[in-house]
Image (tube, grey):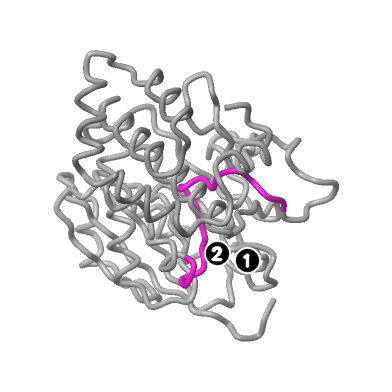
Amino acid sequence: MSSSNPLVSIIFPVKNEGINVKNTLDSLVKVKTDISYEVIIVDDASEDACCDFLSSHDYPIAIKLVKTDGLGAANARNVGAEKASGQYYIFCDAHLFFEDDWIEKLLDPMEKGIADGVVPGIAPHDKPNTVGYGYTINLEKFKANFNGRSILAKGSEPVPTPCLPGGCLAIKKDVFIDIGGFDKGFIVWGHEDVEISIKMWLFGYKCFIQPQVKILHVFRKSFPYNVTVTHADYNMMRMAYSHFSEERIEKCKKYIRVPAKADQIIQSVIDNGALEQRAAYFSRRKFDDDWFFKNFRIDF
């Protein structure tokens, strides 16, 4: 680990998280670390007063509370990054439990120049030995699924992953700025972590798993706010138009779960600038989507 002791900005997007926000912060401040960090909580129009406790609790770390008006998961993260002062950003769900030295270990592959974005192993809080290592893309429904232990090389060295789960995602500040952050045209929820990972790879950056770190995650049975399949399908199609070949765009259209809304979704994606973004991305990327899917042996 470098002796530079980089400042880290830990960014929590929050919406109707109940007691989870407090539990997550309590876990964060209890674990050991020698890294200097700040916390940025982006309260994206919560209706359950889940952040009100901050006014009466004195934490031994700098905490910035930012209020936004229902921007959605991707843009709440972007706002958090705008308020951040760290050299590294760690985007975290507000329902996690941490372990000692997790920040040091998560930063290590980036400090060594191995990776530009890093995720830990992630396990359910009630099944801590069931660990997922990064994401791949499940082509049955075109959604992100955790990689199993088989993705790891012998030992516990960091290894590449197709996608970085957004539940706990570390990235260099300069890389985040260079790629434009999370897609600013995304709505509500869905595919924001897959999109930023694909964008990183295509722009020449590297996404890795750090299996020496494990974070426990509260996997909820339902969303505490309104999310529809149309929201996620809109984001999927925006991602497809931004990064994929015409053939893959057509394949993605078949994943739209309410076919009657397909034309409306696609037209909205186009009206909101996806083709212009596609041209800008294609002009600067170092690899194409054929390379990405072949490199990670995803037959899409």
Mark 1 Cα shell of 10 Å, populated few (<14), some (14-19), many (≥20): some
- Residue in front for this viewpoint, 130 or 142: 142
Residue 137 in the image, given as x and y percentages of width and height: 55, 32
24 or 287, which lies in front? 287
Q: Secondary structure at mark 2?
A: loop
- The picture places residue 270, in percent across and down from the top left corner, at 24, 38
Q: Residue at x 58, y 82 (%)?
A: 5
Q: Are marks 1 and 2 in contact (CB under 8 Å)?
A: yes
Residue 116 image point, x, y percent: 58, 63
The Cα–Cα distance between marks 1 and 2, rounded to whole angstroms, is: 7 Å
Q: Which residues are magenta?
A: 159-175
Could you tell me which secondary element the residue under label 1 belongs to?
Answer: loop
Q: Is residue 159 above or below residue 170?
A: above
**Label drawn at residue 101:** 1
Position in image of residue 4 (x %, y %): 60, 86
- The residue at 84%/50% (across/down) is 155
Kind of residue at badge 1: Asp
Q: Which mark is residue 172?
A: none
Relative side of 120 to 94, left or right = right
Residue 31's disc number = 2
Residues 79 and 132: in front is: 79
Q: Earlier in the sequence, mark 1 or mark 2?
A: 2
Quarter holding the N terminus? bottom right
